Image: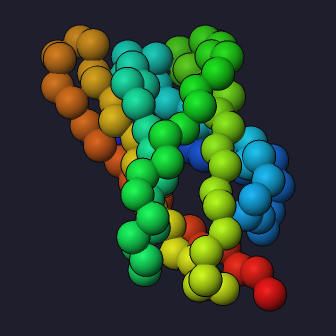
Amino acid sequence: MKLVDSEVTLNFEQYPIVIEEVIKFSVEHNAHFVLQKGWVEGTNMFMGKTNLAIGKSVTLNNAINHQIELFLGACSEPRMRWKLVLDLTDFRTGQEHQVSVFFQTNYN
């Protein structure tokens, strides 16, 4: 995902993404940004917002890597579409930014 003059990268440990299991992934971004919070919300069915559990963060080579966990519950829709949102702040300027990515889960 693009963020001003840099990128935000998400790496899921498992793909395809499954529901009703802990989903682990990492978010990496330039070190001058601070990850404030994040959440996931359904786009084809309202299920509220599920906050991301932001765990361990490591800084290396001017980048920060966050380990994140998430749990998505099942619903009556077999193909659920989701929007993952990250709120970041550029600590150099104080400017707030929001980036998002869309993904889908399937179950039978």
Q: Is residue 3 left or right of residue 15?
A: left
Residue 5 x, y percent position in the rendering: 32, 37
Q: Is residue 20 left or right of residue 91?
A: right
The colour scheme applied to this rendered structure is rainbow
Residue in front for this viewpoint, 37 or 21 = 21
Q: Which quadrant of the figure contains the C terminus?
A: bottom right
Above or below 30: residue 2 = below
At 76% from the left and 64% from the top, the residue drawn is 18
Q: Which residue is most to the front? A: 76
Q: Quadrant of residue 16?
A: bottom right
Residue 44 x, y percent position in the rendering: 43, 80
Residue in front for this viewpoint, 89 or 108 = 108
Q: Quadrant of residue 26?
A: top right
At 34% from the left and 36% from the top, the residue drawn is 87
| Numbered circles on residues, count | 0
At 68% from the left and 28% from the top, the residue drawn is 67
Above or below 62: residue 80 = below
At 48% from the left and 53% from the top, the residue drawn is 40
Above or below 104: residue 72 = above
Residue in front for this viewpoint, 78 or 83 = 78
